[in-house]
Amino acid sequence: MIGYVTIGVSDMNRAKQFYSDLLADLGAKVLLDMERIAFVGKSMSEPMLAVCTPYDKKPNHPGNGNMVAIHPGSKEGVDAFYKKAISLGATCDGEPGQRIPNQFYGAYIRDLDGNKVAFFHFG
């Protein structure tokens, strides 16, 4: 259902490198780079994450309440992606842990531009 989610960034090269490194273990890479916007994913026919500099050329601002959620496949994957994001320069916005007993395990980070990203596992 979702084709791609776009987040605004201040430095395209830095954002492309961050998300390429972070999502490499899921088989993702920059699939399409159009200078102002780049699409990161496994294939153009699967959901992607796009990073872009705002079209109006004004500074990017993370949206209050906006968040990208990435499913790495397991609780261990949540832990690993959280640690990897922190090692790549992200900041903690909620350490890995069980949020809803036996249902939702998650961790939250802010990327290099302050965009909120969740890593999660159901069950």
Image (tube, helix red, strand yellow):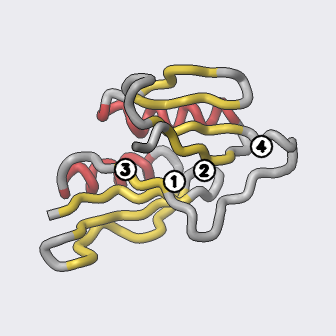
Distance from Cα at disc 4 to Cα at disc 2: 16 Å
- Give SS at disc 2: loop
Residue 28 on image: x %, y %: 39, 29
**Which circle marks residue 36 in the picture?**
none
Secondary structure at badge 4 equals loop
Residue topped by disc 2:
112
The answer to whether the residue labelled 1 contacts the one labelled 4, judged by CB atoms less than 8 Å apart, is: no
**Quarter of the figure with the N terminus:** top left
Q: Which residue is mark 4?
A: 54
Q: Are marks 3 and 1 in contact (CB under 8 Å)?
A: no
Quadrant of the image for the C terminus?
A: bottom left
The foreground one among 58 and 83 is 58
Residue 50: % across, % down:
57, 37
Check residue 90 in the rendering and tell me which mark sits there, or answer none: 1
Residue at 47% of width from left, 60% of height from top? Answer: 109
**Separation of residues labelled 3 and 2 (CA atoms):** 17 Å
> Which residue type does callout 2 highlight?
Leu
Q: Position of residue 58 (x, y in %)?
A: 86, 49
Q: Residue at x 41, y 59 (%)?
A: 118
Instruction: Name the N-terminal-most of marks 2 and 1.
Output: 1
